[in-house]
Image (cartoon, rainbow, N blue to C red):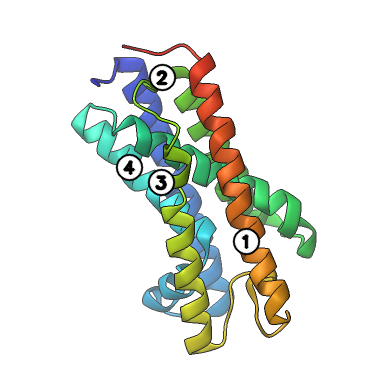
Amino acid sequence: MLLSAPARTCAAIVAALAVLSLCLKFGITQMETGDRIAGVLWAQARYFTILTNGLVAILFMAMVMAGRQVSDRLIAGLVLWIASVGLIYRLLLAELWEPQGLQRIADQGVHAVVPMSVFLWWVIFARKNDIGWLDPLRWLLWPLAYLAYALVRGALDGVYPYPFLDPGRLAPPQLVWNCARLMEGFVGAGYLLFGATRLSPRPA
């Protein structure tokens, strides 16, 4: 679907917000740790939040450059993934630390501003015609791939990105339970999103 001028402009704003939030996050981390850029990028790349914000930046920049929406399924999946970033953060992680100053701005950028801007763009501008009832299961591919990556990387270097995925803190049954509940949450949220597409206006 060709993007209208307002849709393309707003997509550029979403891409810019994602890029600025990520750059601020990287810059602050580099100042705090003194690591080289490559080291900071590698460390930050262990987080679902960072990787998914990166997907937002890439896909929205691609849409701006092409002047076309990516597939209905892919953009809806992206909405699910980035919305989950904000939701998981609020429910499970927000109370674990209290960022201040620029760190707080960057934190709100990747966890709130970008997820909300993606969701609003999707609601207002996105075509939703080609989303089917199996798509919420297909949308599991990204979180499942991340889960495998996070656990394998953690097993290799001993650092796990989130406490609810850390085998050093959790008994194996609890870790399996946490992973299953996360995937269940993605599926449930995916079907809610699918239901929303049946009710929302559909641009041609």
Q: CA distance from mark 1 to mark 2?
A: 33 Å
The 10 Å Cα crowd at callout 2, few under 14, some 14 to 19, many 20 or more, is some
Q: Position of residue 202 (x, y in %)?
A: 41, 13
Q: Earlier in the sequence, mark 1 or mark 2?
A: 2
The 10 Å Cα crowd at callout 3, few under 14, some 14 to 19, many 20 or more, is some
Query: For the view shown, which residue lies furthest in the right direction?
Result: 95
Secondary structure of the residue carrying numbered label 3:
helix
Give the labeled residue for mark 2: 125
Secondary structure of the residue carrying numbered label 2:
helix
Q: CA distance from mark 4 to mark 2?
A: 15 Å
Q: Earlier in the sequence, mark 1 or mark 3?
A: 3
Give the labeled residue for mark 4: 59
**Which of the two discs, 2 and 3, sits closer to the camera?**
3
Q: CA distance from mark 1 to mark 3?
A: 16 Å
Mark 1 residue type: Ala
Secondary structure of the residue carrying numbered label 4:
helix
Which residue is nearer to you in this view: 161 or 99? 161
The residue located at (62%, 61%) in the rendering is 180
Mark 3 residue type: Arg
Give the labeled residue for mark 3: 138
Secondary structure of the residue carrying numbered label 1:
helix
Q: Is residue 64 visible?
A: yes
Mark 4 residue type: Leu
The 10 Å Cα crowd at callout 4, few under 14, some 14 to 19, many 20 or more, is some
The 10 Å Cα crowd at callout 1, few under 14, some 14 to 19, many 20 or more, is few
